[in-house]
Amino acid sequence: MRRGSIVALLALALIAGGVAAAVALVPAWLPEDASRQAGRIAFVFWFVIAICIVIFAVVAAVMIYAVMHFRVPEDDLEDGPPVHGHTGLEITWTVIPFLLVTSIAIVSAIVLSRNDAQARDTLHVNVTAQQFAFTFSYPDAKNATSPVLRLPKGRSVELYMRSLDVIHSVFVPQFSVKEDVVPGLVTQLHITPTRLGTFPLECTELCGLGHSLMRSQAIVMTPAAFDAWLKQQAKSAAPAPSTTSTSTTSTPASAAGLSAFNTYGCSGCHTLTAAKATGAVGPNLDKLVSYAKQANQPLAAFVHESIVDPNAYVQQGYPKGVMPQNFAQKLTKSELDALVTFLVESAESASKKG
Ligand code: CUA
């Protein structure tokens, strides 16, 4: 092979590799890492991308060189000379890909096993998914529930995820982890947050009409702030002494109703001051008194019907069919009654206030 050809091939490879590297590096393809898992996954990603760029540069250089130098003249109608096997070349193009693919498999296996390795002080969080909300509960805080996932920075966290209805999936882009939540199974997801902040937590499995609305947040706090929050949750999860209670949970039925409200994820979609819920997907439950008037029904009957048969009357301005039809089937009869009592009492007290 002539020296000029080698120089030309090298120059072409450098140009092609440079263009591919610029496309890979200049736009921000991945969100900024916020977990130890994400950092390791990004390493695998860039390891594979680097291999791809080198292969692309070699193939593109040879292809462009061949197009430029071995063009058939227009009047040449003959076939080229027959080409037989070249053992050395064949061994080369078998061994190199074998080594590359094997190295990718080894690096991936190491990253996968390290990403799932739990530390000794792993924090357990139970996740309940249902159409169309996530609820997070903390066994360390007497199973206190939260509509957002709060995590301490730097600590290993294991999510135990259950679904009450169909298949959902939990994904936080900045954590680079995703796992399906399947009815009848408890799936796990391991996260070690490394950056303070609020990140989107979304459902990534088409789970019904409200799928696109099934979003929550992952909030990474300093360990001290998280411990303080967890203690506070444990306190409010315990039966509150009546003197310190500022909410409207005056009767036992209404307290059971608040607990059902939190357990079944109502706060994922609805606003209700009495439950400190701020969801904006479905109707604002502080306004139930005026909604019942618009629907021309007594308040308690209206609330009961709206839970059992959500599409019988849909408040204007809110999407039809998003509140799950089978929602009431998840509740026991006494839970349903308690929930209705709680909503009626909260709505009446909210309408008196404003
Ligand atoms: Cu749950 Cu999509």
Image (cartoon, rainbow, N blue to C red):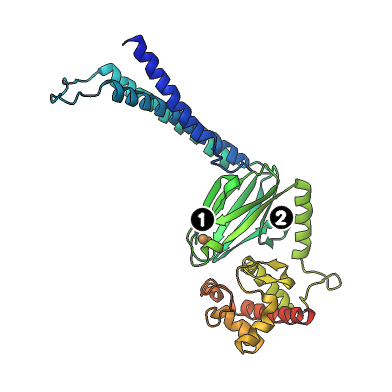
Q: Which residue is mark 2?
A: 140
- The residue drawn where x is 64% and y is 81% is 337
Q: Amino acid at mark 1?
A: Thr
Label 1 residue near ligand 1, CB within 8 Å: yes
Q: Earlier in the sequence, mark 2 or mark 1?
A: 2
> In the visual, does 278 lie left or right of 41?
right
Please state which of residues 165 and 85 is positioned toward the viewer in this rendering.
85
Q: Quadrant of residue 126?
A: bottom right
Q: Quadrant of the C terminus?
A: bottom right
Q: Quadrant of the N terminus?
A: top left
Tell me the mark number nearer the camera, choosing from 2 and 1.
1
- Which residue is situated farthest in the right direction here? 243
* Whether residue 244 is situated above or below residue 224 in the rendered picture: below
Please state which of residues 160 and 23 is positioned toward the viewer in this rendering.
23
- Residue 79's x, y, as percent? 14, 24
Asked whether disc 2 touches disc 1, contact meaning CB atoms under 8 Å apart, the reply is: no
Marking on residue 235: none
Q: Quadrant of residue 164?
A: bottom right
Please state which of residues 230 and 56 is positioned toward the viewer in this rendering.
56
Q: Amino acid at mark 2?
A: Asp
SS assignment at label 1: loop
> In the visual, does 115 lie left or right of 75?
right
Q: Which residue is mark 1?
A: 204
Q: How many marks?
A: 2
Report whether residue 7 is seen.
Answer: yes
Q: Callout 2: few (<14), some (14-19), or many (20+) C-alpha neighbours within 10 Å? A: some
* Whether residue 36 is situated above or below residue 61 in the rendered picture: below
* Whether residue 68 is situated above or below residue 344 in the rendered picture: above
